[in-house]
Amino acid sequence: MALPRLSLSAAVLVMCQTAWTQSPTYGLGRSPSSEEIRKWDIAISPTGKELPEGQGTAKEGELLYRSKGCAGCHGATGSGMHAPTLISRKDVKPNPAAFCLAPCVNDANSMSLHSPFATTLWDYINRGMPLGKEGSLTPNEVYALTAFLLYKNDVIKEDEVMDKQSLPKVKMPNRDGFGLPPAWKHGEPRLQGYP
Amino acid sequence: MDAKRRNRRGFLKSGAALAGLAAGGSKLAKGQTQGTPAKKIDELIAYGERSRFVTSIRVPVAERHSPDEFGLTFHVLTPLQDSSGIITPSSLFYTATHRGAFVPDIDPKEHRLMIHGMVDRPLVFTLDELKRLPYVSRIHFIECLGNRARPTHKTVQETHGLTSCAEWTGVPLPLLLKEAGVQSGASWIVAEGAEEVKGDSSIPLAKALDDCVVVYAMNGEPLRPQQGFPLRLMVPGFEGIYQIKYLRRIKVVDRYYMTYDDYGHINPDPKVAALTHIIGPKSVITFPSGGQQLSGPGFYEISGLAWSGSGAIRRVELSTDGGRNWKDAELRSPALPMAHTRFGYHWNWDGKECVLMSRCTDELGTVQPTRAEVAKYWNQPLDQNFRVPGADNSVQPWKITSNGSVQNGLA
């Protein structure tokens, strides 16, 4: 076991030192068209560079929240149902900085409060919701639903229009309250001096 | 060939029927083989089964009912108390679904893996193409970040059952990334699954170029659906959520993407964040463990598992007096990097109440801490409510009472 592992990482080291952009060795796999890549590529960067055209407001989102079935699983008020809380309750003290594990929402903490970027919300509604009919929402609908949840969590104003320019710029409550995972390096401990 | 096979099957069937006839009617003495119905014999020829006297099973975590209101099986625990050696049988491997995911029913002929983003040559692979490429087989554990012993837990299945270890076979990710040609400026990859919510995680490019594997087989057969059939990303030593099941896409990017899976990991304290991604050196005694019963004083072979997300296990120590004295245990299996490692320890129980503990050291020299040591590091009081920040790799005490029953030492 140990030997192939070592020789592989040695090979990787060599590869890293020489150019990574050399020609392929095996010639397997086909090249996708840019249209195909665009269709698959649903991962949205915090910069929002992959966000599509379109726009929406909280008012439009409020109607969609009911008509698209979100309320049925997440509750009419956005909490208290089987699916995770989407609208934090005002009567519970929110603690957006609290350590949490997936799923990290509770009545006082929702994605709108905990994620440092509004793009997380857009990305997840677009890829995963409504559960059972994922991928059925149009970009306008996803912008509107995102705006609605941000507004209900007091992150944006009711009339703010969300689109590919404004969404990444939303100042999220937890924007400065998170530590990135450390740069990973082979052979280094998780945390120097712990415990 | 076909006719021949049919004949053989016919023969076996009638043979079985005869055996059944012979057994039928007469009362069998205890322990004697019973006649097995012909259909069953066919099934057993095709796919073996364990003895009906072996009843070890997985159970769902007590904290969240499975299946839940949405039909999701959430976290299901492996029965470590019954384990031997280092390989977890695929049927008993712990499972944790990707958040909100049902287990998808994927036709491998339709499944594709796309590699794109900051690469010179975006590529799409079929499973057949991936299987034509050079492959590796490696033994690695996977552990869920939620694997955390609580005072209410009774058994090692409850305290530690969200870790399992298997042999994984697949194509090294560095090879695939080299085929695509990673561009300069890239620093992360986003790996994504094909299930409903298409769960995705950001993974450091340095790790992707080190020892990650795009896996299609587990313990000598195709991956089980609960383990990501037909493709899974293996990120050795990183916590479970990174081991993307139903892998369909790898996007090479220039930053942390803060995906749905990522945002659950973030923490304002970078020190806690650092302890949240990689599994620290950890060990646990599986025999004797909570809920088991010693039949009386005398010789027992203590058995347990040790593992670390940062490499191979170098040493396991054992205490039979609640951590006052430690002696070396013996490694009873190969000590492979990021793999469960089996240890053993000769023990003569004098029949008195005592507390058993194990602790391990990995190849970086990092020693598994006790809860007291962790509390001291964070300058927090040590009581039942103390929660180890990040991944909990603290020492597990088992209390042996004078009547031989084994209890959770945290209770």
Image (spheres, grey):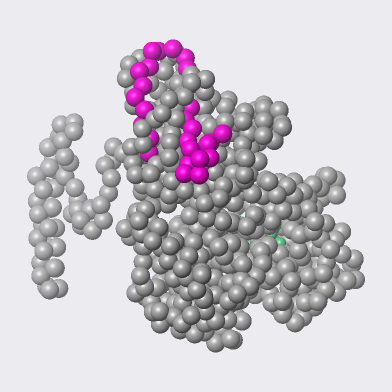
Which residue occupies the foreground of this view, A44 or B186? Answer: B186
**Residue B19 in picture, x, y percent from top left:** 11, 48
Which residue occupies the foreground of this view, B70 or B306? Answer: B306
Question: Residue at 11% across / 64% down in the picture?
Answer: B8
The main secondary structure of the magenta stretch is: strand
Q: Is residue A142 above or below residue B256?
A: below
The quadrant holding residue B132 is: bottom left
Question: Residue at 14% across / 48% down in the picture?
Answer: B20
**Residue B42 in picture, x, y percent from top left:** 20, 57
Tell me, yes or no, whether the highlighted magenta stretch contains residue B345: yes
Would you say B325 lies left or right of B294 here? right
Q: Is residue B338 above or below residue A121?
A: above
Q: How many marks?
A: 0
Q: Is residue B372 above or below residue A40?
A: above
**Residue B62 in picture, x, y percent from top left:** 56, 39
Residue A62 at least partly seen: no
**Residue B233 in picture, x, y percent from top left:** 48, 62
Would you say B341 lies left or right of B25 here? right
Image quarter where the C terminus of chain B lies is top right
Q: Tell me where the magenta segment starts and ends, as one range.
A: B342-369
Would you say B4 lies left or right of A194 here? left
